[in-house]
Amino acid sequence: MKTTPRSGMTGEERITVDASNRIVFADDRMPAVLATPWLVAHLEYAARHAIAPCLEDHERSVGTFIEVEHLGATPEGVTVICRARVIHVDGPSVTFQVEARDEVELIARGIHRRRVIDVDRFARRLARKRSRLEG
């Protein structure tokens, strides 16, 4: 890492609910709302943004843990702001408090952990695993 992430660093990601990220089971009775998997993805993106300035070119952060309460539904056309704040750093492991708000209320909150990895080492490990699967 260029610099060690520090408590209080933040990242943000915005998402507007549309056909690409809403629930797939919306119908005449069930309104189209933001799907939980997309909400979780954007919370992870916010955390990734928070520590990206600390990383070397050969490093990335990968998610290793997430616990999120999806507290409220957000209808199509509404923007959600996902935020992540570093709350703990233990070597390459960084823990975040995450939350998401739409234009009316808090819709999610939780904890997320990411690990800083060397992408070349990661690619080699994955190649070894792939060769074991193919061979």
Image (spheres, grey):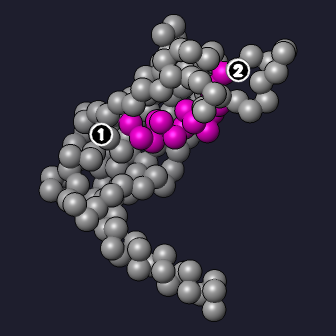
Give the position of the C terminus as an image quadrant: bottom right
Residue 81 occupies which quadrant of the picture? top left
Residue at the farthest bottom position: 135
The mark found on residue 50 in the picture is 1
User: Main SS type for the magenta part?
Assistant: helix
* Secondary structure found at label 1: helix
Res. 24 in view: yes
Is residue 96 something that shows in the picture?
no
Where residue 36 sits, quadrant-wise, is: top right
* Residue toward you, 85 or 44: 44
Span colored in magenta: 33-46
Q: Mark 2 points at which residue?
A: 32
Gap between marks 1 and 2 measured at Cα: 30 Å
Residue appearing at x 33%, y 73% in the figure: 120
* Quadrant that contains the N terminus: bottom left
The extreme top residue here reads 104
- Of residues 70 and 103, the one drawn nearer to the viewer in this rendering: 103
Q: Position of residue 72 (x, y in %)?
A: 62, 18
Q: Is mark 2 on a helix, strand or loop?
A: loop
Residue 101 within the magenta-colored segment of the rendering: no
